[in-house]
Amino acid sequence: MQAKIRQLLKEKNAVLLAHNYQPPEIQALADICGDSLELSIRAADTDADVIVFCGVHFMAETASILSPQKTVLLPRTDAGCPMADMITPAALKARLAALPEMPVVTYVNSPAAVKALSTICCTSANAIEVVRSLAADELLMTPDRNLARNTARHTDKTIHLWEGCCPFHDLLSVADVQSARAAHPQALFIAHPECRPEVVEMADAALSTSGMMRFAAESDATEFIVGTEVGLLHPLASKNPGKTFYPASEKMLCLDMKKITPPDILTCLETMSGQVKVPEEIRVPALAAVDRMIALSR
Ligand code: 13P
Ligand code: SF4
């Protein structure tokens, strides 16, 4: 299966991108694994004709926004993001109509049509930098209220919230972290900025998924409590032999990130199915918001 997939990727001049939460067998097949920001940049830079995106729908959309001339395939088109579904263009327009004019910072975990209405995008790796880059002192941040609150702690700007969240990061509680710390008193606690602010405040570091990978590799500590989706535990453990990683909560499991299997990738390459293409009238304004973010982060 692996050899067949690699052969088809070569024949079709295709690149396989996988998010850090993807199952081990998918990460093992991928040309590039990374966090949302790294994958966006790699999708923009690749000279492949085809991008096979092993992640969720908004990530494939971002690749299509950046590379309209390329064929972007999502091996399971039903792999979505519950947080991205917590905002629509109509709801955003209604909210903006009730606010004074201000920039809109939209997390990449959002529909393309919402990005198209936004001033600039951000990821968990660059949200603070993006907010600081704006001239305005007041802004709306969508759709993750936790990322917005965690970013607000690093700036004097007034940040209006959108009431969305990642259901799996949002359920990590202070009590969960306390009991993980009691069980592993030597461990450092690393948290994703999609976690609640009271949880992020307890953390030794708040980082994107790739930020966690780098932190674990560079740290002198040998034990870590990991406050993000449990899929990250595998790459953390396999890239850091001799270090031990504990989930902050076993409940942090995103099933959408586990939908794609190697047979799905094979079928999608054989039949070129699962194409994600953002229509031009949405892509062009969405690209402006994504490009502003990438220009800051390169
Ligand atoms: P990052 O990999 O950008 O930290 O994002 C986490 C996430 O929830 C992606 O869906
Ligand atoms: Fe969306 Fe959360 Fe799943 Fe990431 S982990 S894809 S934010 S639901």
Image (cartoon, rainbow, N blue to C red):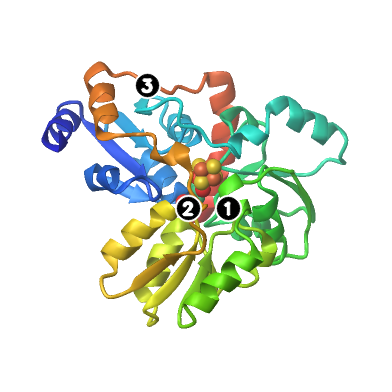
- Residue 200 appears in view: no
In this rendering, the label closer to the viewer, 3 or 2? 2
Q: Nearer the viewer, residue 170 or 194?
A: 170
Q: In the picture, which quadrant includes the N terminus?
A: top left
Q: Mark 3 is on which residue type?
A: Gly
Name the image quarter holding residue 240. Answer: bottom left
* Residue 238 point in image, percent of width and height: 27, 62
> At 62% across and 53% down in the image, what residue appears?
171
> At 25% across and 22% down in the image, what residue appears?
267
Q: In the picture, which quadrant includes the C terminus?
A: bottom left
Q: Mark 2 is on which residue type?
A: Glu
> At 65% across and 67% down in the image, what residue appears?
174
Mark 2 = which residue?
A: 229
Helix, strand or loop at disc 3? loop
Marked residue nearer the N-terminal end (1 or 2): 1
Mark 1 = which residue?
A: 169
Q: Is mark 1 within 8 Å of ligand 2?
A: yes
> At 39% across and 40% down in the image, what residue appears?
258
Number of the label disc, if any, that sits on residue 274:
3
**Residue contact at pointers 1 and 2, CB within 8 angstroms:** yes
74 vs 18: above or below: above
